[in-house]
Amino acid sequence: MKIRHGGFDDVPAVLDFWLLAAEGTDRRDSPDKVMALIERDPEALLIAELDGELVGTLIAGWDGWRAHLYRLAVHPSHRRKGIATTLLAAAESRFAAFGAFRADAMVLDDNLSAHGAWSAAGYALQPMWSRWVKPLK
């Protein structure tokens, strides 16, 4: 398995992959948004490949203050093979190089299968606060 940074040429395949492998996406994804991510932070989009096939993704965002994880997705036919673990290790290594002391992950409450994966990776629900959001559009 190879972990690499996603580039502009990967955007169409990544968007298609998320429709297949990501749970509960808001369907507001667009090529422009993913390209803006890559332009702002060329190392944020991690792609796992197996024999040249895209089998996993993870966005490892660093805003200069906190380390954020989004869009951990593994192809349904390749789950439970260590792909998510490998992607998380790459993200955590990236964050350690920035001096981050903690990473947070966006995980849907209803995605129960993901809860086990995140828990096994050492992540836990943080009960002392919740994320507050305001739709901008």
Image: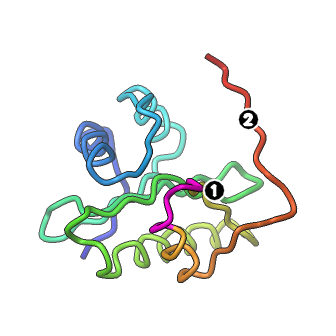
Eyeballing the image, is 114 above or below 65? below
**Whole-percent x, y for residue 85 in the image:** 43, 78
Write down the residue under mark 1: 68
Instruction: Point out the residue furthest to the top here.
Output: 137
Q: If the image is split into quadrants, where does the C terminus sit?
A: top right
Q: How is the image coloured?
A: rainbow
Residue occupying the point 55% across, 75% down: 93
**Whole-percent x, y for residue 92 in the image:** 57, 72
Q: Earlier in the sequence, mark 2 or mark 1?
A: 1
Q: If the image is split into quadrants, where does the N terminus sit?
A: bottom left
Q: How many marks?
A: 2
Eyeballing the image, is 41 above or below 129? above
Callout 2, which amino acid? Val
Eyeballing the image, is 48 above or below 119? above
Q: Which residues are magenta?
A: 108-114
Callout 1, which amino acid? His
Residue occupying the point 26% across, 62% down: 75
Write down the residue under mark 2: 133
Q: Secondary structure at mark 2?
A: loop
- Nearer to us: label 2 or label 1: 2
Q: Nearer the viewer, residue 95 or 82?
A: 82
Instruction: Point out the residue furthest to the right here.
Output: 128
Residue occupying the point 54% across, 57% down: 60
Q: Are marks 2 and 1 in contact (CB under 8 Å)?
A: no
Q: Is residue 32 left or right of residue 102?
A: left
**Whole-percent x, y for residue 82 in the image:** 35, 81
Q: Is residue 112 magenta?
A: yes
Q: Residues within 10 Å of mark 2 (few under 14, many from 20)?
A: few
